[in-house]
Image (tube, rainbow, N blue to C red):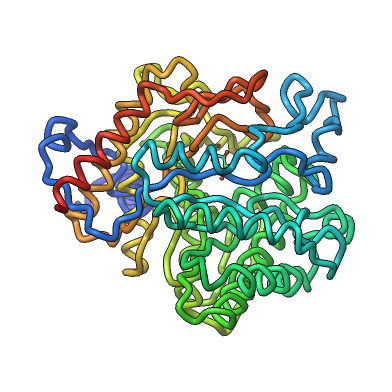
Amino acid sequence: MKHLPRIVLVVITLILLYGTALLVFVDPNIGLELDRHYLLNDTLRFGRGFLWGAATSAYQVEGNCTNSNWWEFESAVDKQGLPRIERGQRSGIAADHWRRYKEDVQLLKEMRLNAYRFSVEWSKIEPEEGIFADSALDHYERVVDELRANGIEPFITLHHFTNPLWFERKGGFERDDSPEILARFARRVAGRLGPKVRFWATVNEPNVYAAEGYYSGTFPPGKQNPARAILVFRNLLRAHTACYLAIKEADPEAQVGLPISVFIIDPAEKWNLLDVLLAHYLNKAYTVSAVEYLTTGVYDLSLPGIGTDHYESGIPDAFDFVGLNYYSRIYCHFKPFAEEKFVAVAPPLTAMQADNGWEIYKEGLIRALYMISSRTGKPIYITENGIADDSDQKRATFIEDHVLTANRAIFERMNVRGYFYWSLMDNFEWTHGFDKRFGLYAVDYATQKRTVRQGSLKYKEIVMTWARRLR
Ligand code: GCO
């Protein structure tokens, strides 16, 4: 070795450092493959109390959420003067679920489901600051009673992206006191519905809310300010803790958790160290930081070149479960000389895709479950998983593959306690309007007629098989 030219030693050292960095930062499960044949032959391990549900959110299905930030956002345009919602669509009466909830509870029953995740619309319950509309609370109590009368477990999301206009105009979750403002709302709702509702999801996808509303600017308030995005993420996590405490005060037996969006972020080029490092930091910032906040009460966010934050709530373990909203995988690529330093690149041509371009990637579900369960042994509810599939050609296989992947996770001792398909019926898919069809039931918006999709019957079949085996 001592006679080797110095340059050769330097090159060998650099190669060793490069290889070590790749090994350290690449997710060991990046190449995971689950053989469909084995999944289909796995024994079903879903326990007696397993929740089989479907999910919706108030704004997307109820209709007439006229007093909310999204209603105002729908009539706005972006910097290029283009409408915020594709084709200038408006949510209007959406799927008219506010009026048709009894009919829709029967759809849950028809699918043999035993749980329903839905959100309560803050702008209807607290239309003015500190003023609570009993009529709205009465409505949600009727929904809960209808569910219970049909043997279906209500699973309520307190905040699902939408804010009352009065709150948005005060600065929304940029405000330092926003957690207390949301907790006041939580206390009122849990105080009213608490005895009849066991499961509470506090803030839906704080990471998506912060990223879309304040980094990409595609959601209200349409800002593109990384520092604000990081602050809003922090305040939403603080709001979760404040709501957790408020709900527990109303009902110590309540099960309270946080639904986190997890997209698996993989390097577009596995051997490109820049892509590998980018994927590592994005995964950590976008999802791991929220899970670690739940367990430790410490929010540690670090995105080199974008921003950092560190906050300690002093209240670790303020959760009873983690909600996992899993759909797909994103491939990230670092472009050192471009204005937009990191971009998402399209899935490989060989990948199956949903109508919205998301790769169908069942292994991502067990990778996401492992990311959570390796940090907390508490129950995990898959609070959203579904496919935009208008032709219904892929829905049955999507559902079967993802449910059986969850089954494999249980076999690998992950504490999965429920699965909620997104969504019960077609609905207002935010900036996509009504164009992306996720529903187990298709909705004809001209007549509001619900029609079960053939692909959805696979879900019913799985649940019925599970129920038979419990007898
Ligand atoms: C989200 C929301 C849902 C979406 C669903 C499909 O994850 O954005 O929770 O409101 O409609 O995920 O995109």
Please determine whether, in this image, residue 152 is positioned above or below residue 111: below
Q: Position of residue 344 (x, y in %)?
A: 54, 33
**Which is more toward the observer, 203 or 225?**
203
Name the residue: 40% across, 51% down: 382
Asked whether, in this view, residue 199 is left or right of residue 231, the answer is left
Name the residue: 24% across, 51% down: 409
Please determine whether, in this image, residue 19 is positioned above or below residue 85: below
Q: Position of residue 259 (x, y in %)?
A: 51, 56
Name the residue: 76% across, 58% down: 135
**Which is more toward the observer, 206 or 46?**
46
Name the residue: 61% across, 60% down: 141
Asked whether, in this view, residue 352 is left or right of residue 28, the answer is right
Q: Is residue 363 visible?
A: yes
**Which is more toward the observer, 73 or 190?**
190
Q: Position of residue 411 (x, y in %)?
A: 17, 54
Q: Please identify the residue farthest to the front as the structure is shown.
A: 149
Asked whether, in this view, residue 365 is left or right of residue 156, the answer is left
Q: Quadrant of ligand 1?
A: top right
Q: Is residue 9 visible?
A: no
Asked whether, in this view, residue 244 is left or right of residue 6, the answer is right
Q: Position of residue 26 (x, y in %)?
A: 35, 48
Please determine whether, in this image, residue 471 is positioned above or below residue 339: below
How many marks are shown on the rendered structure? Answer: 0
**Which is more toward the observer, 215 or 143?**
143
Task: Write down the quadrant of residue 327 in the picture.
Answer: top left
